[in-house]
């Protein structure tokens, strides 16, 4: 059953879509979609026959027969698992084998399958930092899975994890999973250091909590040293790695998935059982992931020799440029501003966050869109408990570069006007 807090979290996404629909000419700094300039459909569609030929050779059948089999229902856990395993190893340092991968309709399906498989009883809960990605909270809310928020700065997170787990134990509850986006978090843009990742892994291994490591933005690092994924640091079988091609290729292909480690806390049979359970659930949810869409990804991976680096490089340059334009615009607009206005400098990913000197919620989004024709995203929309009321998320991934300065200037006008009204009221 969905709780009241869960229902209001689910409602905010509809609200935001409605605002975007009602003000189509507003500059949206709310949408964290990938930039469409890099969607190369003609090219990608040509990759399908490439994969079809590869299948014909692998199966020892004609190309036409391979095509017919592709158009049929398929293996529940996926067709392109080995190619995906090779790409994850090359591009993300994630070592796995095809049979430990479950391909889903985007990362979203994999996330849903994992949560439903791990949190089966009412006392089995998922942990998450507050605020966190709405795709995770939404799926938990829809299925009545309790989400327990963690509030701590990075250096206190492992202690907080330990004490929350203990408290839950006293309440007769059990933390089964800990959802995290360690690299360029959505919504905050933050990165967890290797030390903190390691500390969290230690507690998770000790408490037998599975980390759900979601990494859609890992290939979009603009500066700074790369931190290995928690999956690569893990020694005890406590990380399920979630991946997606939504950002590196395109969301419409709806291909992502979960990598189950070789063992779950040292138990290889338990890991195989989890893979089987994910597949069983999937077989009654989406039956199997579209083989045509998998063939597109498979063909692109074949054409690119197993790595997406070449395709991602120009995207990364573009997003870095947009981030820099946004940072420059923020400095120009708010550089001399007084207390209460701050923003972070993300080393990668699609978003940054900004603190304001006043509450910014639904009403303010509407006002901002109506009066200033710019749409930012309230950070409180991602909150599990209504924190972050005075912060917003600004996405720089899908806004045309030429509109970034104008969007930030419009936001500046709104903030100035809002502050003046507040002062006049005092
Ligand atoms: C944290 C996070 N996970 C996953 C996804 C992508 O999910 P999918 O593969 O279902 O498109 C996104 C996209 O916005 C995201 O921000």
Image (spheres, rainbow, N blue to C red):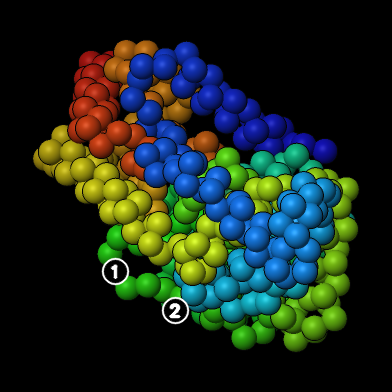
Q: Position of residue 371 (x, y in %)?
A: 32, 13
Label 2 to label 1: alpha-carbon separation: 16 Å
Name the residue located 72 percent from the left edge and 70 percent from the top edge: 58
Relative vertical location of residue 106 with respect to residue 7 in this rendering, above or below? below
> Which corner quadrant holds the C terminus?
top left
Q: In this view of the protein, which residue sits in the foreground, 68 or 169?
A: 68
Q: In this view of the protein, which residue sits in the foreground, 336 or 338?
A: 336
> In the figure, residue 116 lies in which quadrant?
bottom right
Instruction: Tell me which numbered mark, 2 or 1, is placed earlier along the sequence.
Output: 2
Q: In this view of the protein, which residue sits in the foreground, 151 or 12?
A: 12
Residue 195: mark in rendering? 2
Q: Position of residue 13 (x, y in %)?
A: 57, 30
> Which corner quadrant holds the N terminus?
top right
Q: In this view of the protein, which residue sits in the foreground, 351 or 389?
A: 351
Q: Position of residue 60 (x, y in %)?
A: 77, 69
Residue 395: mark in rendering? none
Q: Of helix, strand and loop, which one carries label 2?
A: helix
> In the figure, residue 84 lies in which quadrant?
bottom right
Relative vertical location of residue 381 with respect to residue 241 in this rendering, above or below? above
Name the residue located 42 percent from the left edge and 15 percent from the top edge: 23
Q: Is residue 150 left or right of residue 34?
A: right
Return the residue at label 1: 224
So how many labels did they put on this image? 2
Question: 10 Å neighbourhood of mark 1: few (<14), some, or many (≥20)?
Answer: few
Q: Position of residue 90 (x, y in %)?
A: 49, 74
Residue 416 in view in this figure: yes
Residue 191 in view in this figure: no
Q: Of helix, strand and loop, which one carries label 1?
A: loop
């Amino acid at each position: 059953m969905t709780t009241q807090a869960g229902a209001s979290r689910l409602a905010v996404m509809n609200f935001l879509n409605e605002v975007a629909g009602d003000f189509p000419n507003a500059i949206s700094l709310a949408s964290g979609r990938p930039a469409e300039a890099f969607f190369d459909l003609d090219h990608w569609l040509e990759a399908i026959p490439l994969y079809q030929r590869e299948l014909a050779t692998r199966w020892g059948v004609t190309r036409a027969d391979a095509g017919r089999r592709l158009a049929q229902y398929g293996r529940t856990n996926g067709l392109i698992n080995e190619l995906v395993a090779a790409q994850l190893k090359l591009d993300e340092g994630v070592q796995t084998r095809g049979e430990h991968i479950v391909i889903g309709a985007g990362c979203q399906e994999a996330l849903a399958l994992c949560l439903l498989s791990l949190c089966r009883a009412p006392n089995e809960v998922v942990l998450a930092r507050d605020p966190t990605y709405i795709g995770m909270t939404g799926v938990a809310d829809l299925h009545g899975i309790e989400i327990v928020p963690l509030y701590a700065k990075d250096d206190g997170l492992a202690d907080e994890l330990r004490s929350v787990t203990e408290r839950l134990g006293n309440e007769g509850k059990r933390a089964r999973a800990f959802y995290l986006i360690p690299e360029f978090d959505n919504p905050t843009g933050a990165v967890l250091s290797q030390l903190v990742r390691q500390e969290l892994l230690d507690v998770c291994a000790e408490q037998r909590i599975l980390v759900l490591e979601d990494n859609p933005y890992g290939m979009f690092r603009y500066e700074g040293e790369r931190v290995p994924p928690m999956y690569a640091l893990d020694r005890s079988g406590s990380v399920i790695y979630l991946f997606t091609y939504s950002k590196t290729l395109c969301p419409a292909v709806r291909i992502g998935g979960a990598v189950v480690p070789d063992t779950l806390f040292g138990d290889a049979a338990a890991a195989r059982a989890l893979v089987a359970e994910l597949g069983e659930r999937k077989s009654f949810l989406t039956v199997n992931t579209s083989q045509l869409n998998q063939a597109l990804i498979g063909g692109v991976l074949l054409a690119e020799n197993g790595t997406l680096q070449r395709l991602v490089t120009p995207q990364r340059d573009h997003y870095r440029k947009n981030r820099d334009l946004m940072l420059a615009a923020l400095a120009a607009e708010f550089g001399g501003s007084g207390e209460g206005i701050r923003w972070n400098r993300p080393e990668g990913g699609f978003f940054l966050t900004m603190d304001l000197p006043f509450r910014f919620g639904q009403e303010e989004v509407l006002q901002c869109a109506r009066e200033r024709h710019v749409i930012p995203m309230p950070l409180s929309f991602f909150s599990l408990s209504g924190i972050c009321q005075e912060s917003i998320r600004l996405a720089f991934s899908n806004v045309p570069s030429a509109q970034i300065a104008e969007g930030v200037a419009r936001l500046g006008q709104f903030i100035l006007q809002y502050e003046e009204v507040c002062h006049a009221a005092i």
